[in-house]
Image (cartoon, helix red, strand yellow):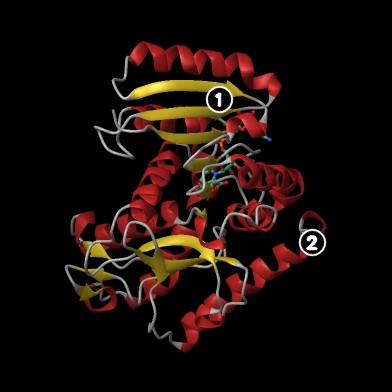
Amino acid sequence: MTTPVKVAVTGAAGQISYSLLFRIAAGEVFGAEVPVELRLIEVDPAMRALEGVVMELDDCAFPNLVNVVTTSDLKVGFDGVNWALLIGSVPRKQGMERGDLLGVNGGIFKPQGQAIAAAAASDVRVLVVGNPCNTNCLIARENGKDVPADRWFSMMRLDQNRAMTQLARKAGKPVTTVTKMAVWGNHSATQFPDYYHAEIDGVSAPEVVADHAWLAGEFISTVQKRGAAIIEARGASSAASAANAVIDTVRSIATPTPTGDWASVGVVSRGEYGIPEGLQFGFPIRSDGSSWEVVDGLTHSVSAQRLIDVTRDELLGERAEVTELLP
Ligand SMILES: NC(=O)C1=CN([C@@H]2O[C@H](COP(=O)(O)OP(=O)(O)OC[C@H]3O[C@@H](n4cnc5c(N)ncnc54)[C@H](O)[C@@H]3O)[C@@H](O)[C@H]2O)C=CC1
Ligand SMILES: O=C([O-])CC(=O)C(=O)O
């Protein structure tokens, strides 16, 4: 039998995980034929709820779910894992920005980074979802330096997917026609969904969508503020769409990127596009299934560069706020 993929999920009793775990166990992420072991990490008060989630996983009789471990001990949870999905943290409420969560959530990611470096498999890859995800990822990565910096990712994919749907709808085309949707910078209200480089049916989006005022205005702000709009409407932050974006992100990293496209992922900056080294920054990337690279050679207009500068500065500010959590 093929060796199972071991996947750790923190916040496993939370609302994103409730949408995610069943899809992982059903084979949607690693393939229908690939056995999966889930290592579910929660804080002690949520253990009873987690037991209920495990009962439901049992009751699905998923053929490829070979083992489920539940624990609040990080070393046990991350033991031998090939993927660590760091979701567990507090979501924002109405009226907050994601960066307001740094004080309450940032501290979670230092011990998790340390435990991943100590316990995970040598090929581990880590995706941080808990907000503010880029800076939380930076904290975990800096505290888990035995794991190479290019194996730490933060989630920009929900923004990419939101942007693709908005563009497709405006153009009156199926969402599958939208490619090269880069979202630069922070997963926050300063993110820059880059319509300049996006394509619809292989044609530059600004050529297809004649309403350039909409692109520069409503399109960007709708995507930037979509998380807040969902909190306002639902009374809770996005969960099923976030879980879906986790699946898309893992697949984008672990499988080769289709020709003529890219994926938006928060990755460590090596100075690309003038972004200071070490920031965890949303870039367009291409993967060959094992390694990835930031798409190079894109040029930005003056107004696009201004937007990138704003989101860069916000991430620099967040990094300055968490220096006491960095080694
Ligand atoms: N990056 C992105 O695109 C998105 C990020 N998020 C973020 O994901 C996070 C989780 O959201 P939800 O699942 O809706 O929240 P939730 O409150 O439903 O679940 C969070 C779970 O994490 C657990 N938890 C808290 N601290 C923990 C720790 N130290 N170790 C392990 N588990 C811990 C809680 O007990 C709870 O069960 C939030 O920070 C939210 O803002 C949400 C949507 C999209
Ligand atoms: O907005 C939030 O707080 C949750 C989130 O990250 C999103 O929906 O993009």
Q: Which residue is mark 2?
A: 323
| Mark 1 residue element | loop
Figure quadrant of residue 201: bottom left
Q: Give the side of residue 203 with respect to residue 20, left or right.
A: left
Disc 1 Cβ-to-ligand 1 distance below 8 Å? yes
Which residue reaches farthest bottom?
Answer: 302
Residue 327, relative to residue 17: is it above or below? below
Q: Nearer the viewer, residue 229 or 34?
A: 34
Q: Give the side of residue 3 with respect to residue 310, left or right.
A: left
Residue 28: % across, % down? 30, 36
Marks 2 and 1 sit apart, C-alpha to C-alpha, by 30 Å
Count of number-bearing discs: 2
Mark closest to the chain's N terminus, 2 or 1: 1
Indicate the amino acid at tag 1.
Ala
Give neighbour class at mark 1: few <14, some 14-19, many 20+ (Cα, 10 Å): many
Quarter that holds the C terminus: bottom right
| Mark 2 residue element | helix
Q: Which residue is mark 1?
A: 13
Picture residue at 48% right of the left edge, 63% below the top: 221
Indicate the amino acid at tag 2.
Thr
